Image (cartoon, rainbow, N blue to C red):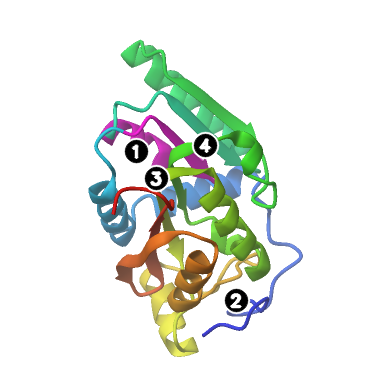
Amino acid sequence: MAQEGVSSTVGPASDQHPGWDDPQRVHGYLERVGRLEPRLEGEDALRALLPAAPSSVLDLGCGDARLAALVVEACPSITRVVGIDASPPMLERARARFAADAHASHTSRSVEIRMGELDDDLRPLGRFDLVVSGFAIHHVEHLRKRELFGEVADVLTPGGLFANLEIVASPTPELHADFLAAIGRTADDPEDRLADVDDQLGWMTQAGLVDVACTWHWKGMALLVGRGAGGPS
């Protein structure tokens, strides 16, 4: 298991590495990751878990809102969408995505794409039937992951779904290097703070989520899910 608070990043972080406020980095990331077949498989696995008629979704580290849009397409019952990200170029793309969606469908759906860090308390945002995240939570320290899972448990409606499609730590450096090679990388991002599946499932359970499980796993990617307490058994 990964040690709490310790990054499993392969290779040194570079002070010259562009941040997520760099449009070129954002464009390169979206072009590369959007084509990955395992990501598409993970998204399909998430889609298969969605409940029949949720009314609200919160997307943590929403990026260009790809995951939020996937959920809304699969669940037209959703009337409230909130996406949080700290990258201005990502937020610009996310707002454009939902602006186009609203124009095409003439929907009265409420969409709020807001600037925010994953260190920010989620509870003032209210309650949600769905909380999703795609390849974002691994950027925060392990202690904050545990706190964040607790806040997710607090904002989920009873029986609501938390689905985190995530980059996870591999059991050995060799397996992690194999994962990076498979996705066309030679090193992690400097801000990566990877934790393994078992640790995260344990933290989610300790945070108060129920029916916690890893429902899909490919090399260093996993779909970690849990539900809000108090729902139907």
Q: Label 2 vs label 4: CA separation?
A: 34 Å
How packed mark 2 is, by other alpha carbons closer than 10 Å (few <14, some 14-19, many 20 or more), is: some
Residue denoted by label 3: 160
Tell me which label, 2 or 1, sits earlier in the chain. Answer: 2
Position of residue 167 relative to residue 46, above or below, is below
Placement of the C terminus among the 4 image quadrants: bottom left
Instruction: Name the secondary structure under disc 1.
Output: helix
Would residue 174 appear left or right of 146 to someone viewing this image? Answer: left
Residue denoted by label 1: 71
Q: Label 1 vs label 3: CA separation?
A: 14 Å
Instruction: Name the secondary structure under disc 3.
Output: strand
Q: Label 3 vs label 4: CA separation?
A: 10 Å
Position of residue 96 relative to residue 187, above or below, is above
**Mark number, residue 127:** 4
Instruction: Name the secondary structure under disc 4.
Output: loop
Tell me which label, 3 or 4, sits earlier in the chain. Answer: 4
Which residue is at 40% across, 23% downward? 79
Q: Is residue 56 magenta?
A: yes
User: Which of 213 and 189 lies nearest the eye of the viewer?
Assistant: 213
Residue denoted by label 2: 9
Q: Which residues are magenta?
A: 54-74
Amino acid type of disc 1?
A: Val
